[in-house]
Image (cartoon, grey):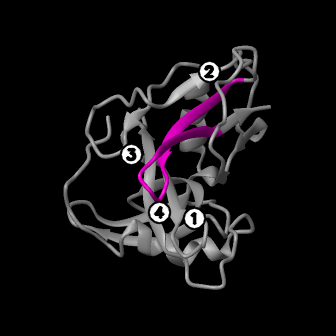
């Protein structure tokens, strides 16, 4: 179980993302500096209790029409040996835990394992900002996930689009989650799909 500390993070996650987002090929440049705003998200627990796992939705307020991005992140107490060169989002000083290395979660095997567990119905999404609190707004739906499925077979949506209608139960295994638009309206869309 991840413990959510009420403390400071310097620089903040949003400050790190403002620098990191423009370096991503899926980021839609606006001609201005990014202004990421937290719009939603959830967490998964690392059974070993070593790696923090967060899935954050941010909207870029620098765009005329704000775009929502899905950013899986992992938090580690030491550099992740063997991580891809571009996997590090940045480092930050946590008020309780000290220096944290924050990674793009799609490069982290701990996140990959827990995301596969979520799609198999073996992990429960947790509230983004509360300790030991399930998040009932995050839904796993669709067909069963074959046991041989690997993380490479998953599609992690980076730019999010609100879903116009409910999903068919016969669809591939997927996860949907809500986020807020700039006007405060809550929408929902697919964040991860198998196959």
The segment highlighted magenta reads 173-191
Q: Is residue 37 above or below residue 110?
A: below
User: Which element type, helix, strand or loop, lies under badge 3?
Assistant: loop
Looking at the picture, how far across and down is residue 157, in whole percent?
68, 47
Between disc 2 and disc 4, whose residue precedes?
A: 4
Q: Which residue is drawn at the image coordinates 59% and 57% (left, top)?
A: 69
Residue behind mark 1: 66
Between disc 4 and disc 1, whose residue precedes?
A: 1
Cβ atoms at labels 3 and 1 below 8 Å apart = no
Q: Quadrant of residue 9?
A: bottom left
User: Which element type, helix, strand or loop, lies under badge 4?
Assistant: strand
In the image, 17: left or right of 120?
A: left
Whether residue 122 appears in this view of the structure is yes
Mark 3 against mark 2, which lies toward the viewer?
Answer: 2
Residue 120 is one of the magenta-drawn residues: no
Residue behind mark 4: 102
Between disc 2 and disc 1, whose residue precedes?
A: 1
């Amino acid at each position: 179980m991840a413990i959510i500390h009420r403390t400071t993070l310097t620089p903040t996650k949003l400050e790190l993302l403002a620098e990191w987002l423009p370096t991503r090929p899926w980021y839609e440049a606006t001609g201005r500096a990014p202004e990421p705003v937290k719009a939603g998200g959830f967490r998964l627990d690392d059974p070993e209790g070593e790696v923090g796992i967060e899935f954050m939705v941010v909207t870029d307020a620098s765009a005329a029409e704000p775009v929502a991005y899905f950013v899986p992140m992992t938090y580690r107490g030491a550099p992740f040996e063997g991580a891809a060169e571009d996997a590090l989002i940045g480092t930050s000083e946590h008020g309780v835990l000290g220096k944290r290395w924050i990674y793009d979660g799609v490069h982290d095997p701990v996140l990959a394992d827990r995301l596969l567990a979520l799609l198999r119905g073996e992990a429960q999404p947790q509230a983004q900002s509360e300790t030991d609190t399930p998040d009932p707004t995050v839904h796993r739906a669709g067909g069963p996930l074959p046991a041989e499925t690997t993380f490479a077979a998953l599609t992690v949506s980076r730019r999010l689009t609100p879903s116009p209608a409910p999903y068919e139960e016969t669809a591939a295994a997927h996860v949907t989650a809500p986020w807020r638009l700039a006007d405060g309206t809550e929408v929902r869309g697919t964040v991860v799909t198998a196959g």
